[in-house]
Image (tube, grey):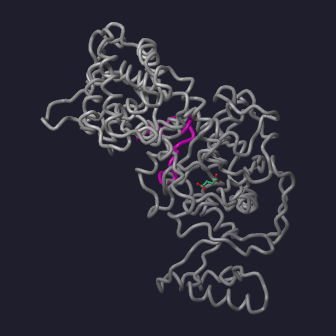
Amino acid sequence: MKVRTRFAPSPTGPLHMGNARTALFSWLFARKERGDFIVRVEDTDKERSRPEWEKDVLSNLEWLGLDWNEGPAGAEDKGSSGPYRQSQRTGIYKEYLERLLSEKKAYWCFCTQDELEAQRQDQASRGETPRYSGRCKTLSQEEQKQNKKAGNSAVIRFVVEPKKVVFKDLIRGEVVFDMALSGDIVIAKDLKTPLYNFTVVVDDYLMRITHVIRGEDHISNTPKQLLLQGALGFPQNIQYAHLPLILGPDKTKLSKRHGDNSVTRFKKQGYLPEAIVNFLALLGWNPGDEREIFSLQGLVKEFSLDRVQKGNAVFNLRRLEWINGYYLRRMDKKALARMAVPYLKEAGLLEQNGNGEEQKFSLKIQKSQPYTIQETGEGIDLEFLAGIVGLYQERLKKLSELVELADFFFKKELNYEEELLSWKGMGEQEIRESLQKVKELLSGILEGEWNKERIEQVLMKEAETMGDKGKLLWPLRAALTGKEASAGPFEVAFVLGKEKTLSRIEQAISKVQ
Ligand code: GLU
């Protein structure tokens, strides 16, 4: 039988990392087994479901590379077991609800919230586990009619057999639930408003799902779903795999309390999809050896449910950063530069200038410089950006960091205190002399020879005569960057270009007049 797995998000919020992990494991298993991966949108909660969340979930799945064989595709569907939005399947559920009602496997319950609360308190006072008493199960047809006529609101309850339900979980082994402790469960608010446990059972059956892979928080739903399958006459041949919980750094279940864990947020911060997928795969699965880097295709080869751990997995941001850094280092500089554009734009570093003209780039490169001018459609010089990005590529953990590291390249004027120019207590005069010397030396370099090696050679020769090299190099670096820490002065000067380098040195000299 062809393997068919599904990811069944409720669009009541954005796709978060935990759900993305569930989707990834279901996807990996399907791909590994050459089966189908189905996406089903569980939007029965009309109040909390929103189209924008569905969009967020689906677009992030796509961004991560988790494609689906069947599921929503724009406003339409692809696949022959749809519709794949539960809100469009009401008619299907109604038939099955009616069947359960007519076979007395489900019944209308008219108990009010107050009555239910009183039942609960009564049970609690006797030391019993609170559960529905079954009061409405024995209502006669006549009593039901009267209740309906009186306009009493009702829900549909499923008769839960008070027996032990045993199933074999592919990760946890044999799992036993004593359903005597459950009471009859609500499966629909009315014929048009079925609830989660019921819709899942109908859909998993009609969509011919073979493996349900989902978070451990759903494990107590499984016995209810198995009983419903039995009552509906569906074969009970779905295999279940409940994935370990993901914990935050404080070892409690990962949730909003730990901050925004949406995939969109990580994407905005400049984490690459390859890195997120790689990281998520290791949240509960391991290859059995020390390897930590896996592409999506590599994972398809290696993945197996046998290697999914039972114990909880801890969300370690350092690890995600490390993995992201790995992928960033391997990227082509220009591609990385292109990816950096939105971050720089958002930080206002690539915006229009005050004159309303397109500033293109606050730093224009001369034709004679090693980077050829290459304007992109957006008026951005990619070669120049690649030069900047290249300075930081080795140590970047995420693209958004670039803004803070490299903002000085883009600014017209640097804002820093005069003291920044001083190396080990140098006074104004000493700083001025140092900067003037540097200016003189750099002015002597021909445009065509403006490269890192030449700059270094010229400056080091002088610096070595000064005993303490910092006396020459620190004021220069501070003048070029306005920062306490940055990339080294030779590479910064090279990327800035001769004109801008000299003008920044002049600005600095004017500070120490
Ligand atoms: N809609 C459920 C959720 O988002 C899916 C649970 C399941 O996979 O059965 O948690």
Q: Quadrant of ligand 1?
A: bottom right
**Does the stretch in magenta take in 85?**
yes
Identify the residue at image location x=42%, y=55%.
Answer: 50
**Does the stretch in magenta take in 140?**
no
Residue 428 is left or right of residue 239, and the answer is left
Residue 388 is situated, as x and y percent measured from the top left of the image, at 41, 26
Q: Is residue 69 visible?
A: no
Identify the residue at image location x=59%, y=84%.
Answer: 111
Residue 39 is situated, as x and y percent measured from the top left of the image, at 57, 42
**Majority secondary structure of the magenta segment?**
loop
Q: Is residue 272 visible?
A: yes
Residue 451 is left or right of residue 101, and the answer is left
Q: Indicate whether 198 appears above or below 153.
A: above
Residue 448 is situated, as x and y percent measured from the top left of the image, at 33, 7
Which quadrant of the structure image shows residue 123?
bottom right
Which quadrant of the structure image shows residue 338?
top left
The quarter of the picture where the N terminus appears is top right
Question: Which segment is the magenta one?
Answer: 66-88
The quarter of the picture where the C terminus appears is top left
Q: Indicate whether 177 appears above or below 154.
A: above
Among all residues in the image, which is located at the extreme right? 174
Identify the residue at image location x=67%, y=42%.
Answer: 208
